[in-house]
Every structure is written in structure tokens, then in C-alpha cells.
Image (cartoon, rainbow, N blue to C red):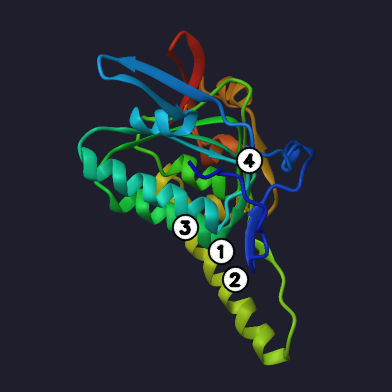
Amino acid sequence: MPSLITRNLSKLWTGVAKTPIMANQRSSYSLIPMVIEHSSRGERAYDIFSRLLKERIICINGPIADDTAHVVVAQLLFLESENPSKPINMYLNSPGGAVTAGLAIYDTMQYIRSPINTICLGQAASMGSLLLAAGAKGERRSLPNATIMIHQPSGGYSGQAKDMTIHTKQIVRVWDSLNALYAKHTGQSVDVIEKNMDRDYFMTPQEAKEKRKSFRVESEGIWEFMCIFPTSVAKVDSYTLF
């Protein structure tokens, strides 16, 4: 199974968390555990990611780029063709990445009929947070020590003045589109989303848990964007995104 890690971040519009949480981005998946299954027909070996895919589990680890999107989109389409009504579990640990690559995954998630349960472990920042929010309602979860972050898209362009004006208009249009998508999946107004995305906004599940006692938008903060409630999954405390 191809690695889900990629270092190609040379996109015009990106959304990567620029924080120390991104440590270890250079780690590779050159050593992939193998799973051996025994049956009456003999033994069969799977790499761990192929075995998880057999259980309808998709892992997105590291920066989101075209290579990542290529693999994830193919997995989503395959699992839908296998059983369009059976849920897919998507585990996210990503600092974000290229907006276009993230939207390719997002659009495929919305396109297929299979419900998608999203689970954040480690971090879901920038485009990673949009994919987390794009899961089925009531099935968007975060493990206790994960971090969620949203912010506006960033990028750079050099060239003639008119071309720079064109690209500036385009990145603003992309930002407006992202604001609308977050509003769609969180139930918040576009104005609230735009305000929260103006700068890097970080949230821990514990902070959101402290605010859950009064279920309303009461002050500025990330809990306005994504209200979280505690639940229990597999004997591990986690938090279900509203």
C-alpha cells in the first residue's frame, strides 16, 4: 500500500499548521508492519494498511498533498463499490496541506453514498480539520489529547501585477468557499466561521468539554465553531463533534 506521507507542499494555496506540533514530518513508512492470516487455504500476508482497508478503515497521516488525495480517493471509491451502505472509518492525524488536494478528498467524501465516521488522533489542523468536520453528523470524534485547528488559507505567487491580482482574487474566493463549507458542517454562521478562521485557532477536547455545560455560543473561541460532547468509544474517552 502506498505511504500516505508526502512532502510535496509546493501548492499555491495551502493550509498547514505552522507550529511545533508538526514535528516528525520527515519520518517515513519504509518499515511497514505485515499481518499474516492463517486459513484452510494456507497463509496470506497483508501490509497493515491493506488489512485495515479490508475492515473499511482509512488512515490519513501527515501533510495532505496530491499523492495523499490520490490514494484516499481511490480507497473511498473502492469501499463504496464494495458496500455503499456500510460505514467507513477515517482516522486523521494531519497538519493540513494543499487546499486543492484536501478538497479532492472532501468532495469524494460527499459524493459517495457510504457514511463516513471521522476520528481525530494527534491533530487535525487546517484542511485536516475540514475533513474531520465533513464526517457523518454525530460520528465526528476526537481522542482526548488531540488538537484541532482552523485558519485561513495561505500561499504565495510572484509575477506580473495583473497576474498577482488574478491570483489574489482566486485565493479570496477559495477562502469564501472554505468558510461556507465549515458553516455547512458545523451549523455556525459564515460570519462566525470567518471570524474564527482569521488567524490560527487551536482547540483541545478538554477545553471544549469545559464549555459544553452551557450549549450555546457564549463567547469568542473555537467552541463556537465546533461544539463537542463526551462519549465513550472502545473504553477510551473521546469526544463526539456536534
Circle 2: residue type: Ile
Residue pointed to by mark 2: 171
Classify mark 1: residues with Cα within 10 Å, few (<14), some (14-19) or many (20+). Answer: many
Farthest-out residue, right: 20
So how many labels did they put on this image? 4
User: x%, y% of residue 129?
Assistant: 54, 43
Quadrant in which residue 67 is drawn = bottom right
Residue pointed to by mark 3: 103
Say which element carries label 4.
loop
Image quadrant containing the C terminus: top left
Whether residues under marks 3 and 1 lie with C-beta atoms below 8 angstroms apart, the answer is: no
Asked if residue 190 can be seen in this view, the reply is: no
Q: Nearer the viewer, residue 223 or 11?
A: 11
Whether residues under marks 3 and 4 lie with C-beta atoms below 8 angstroms apart, the answer is: no
Q: Nearer the viewer, residue 148 or 67?
A: 67
Circle 3: residue type: Leu
Mark 3 and mark 4: Cα distance apart in space? 27 Å
Position above or below: 171 against 54: below
Residue pointed to by mark 1: 175
Which dot, 3 or 4, sits closer to the camera?
A: 3
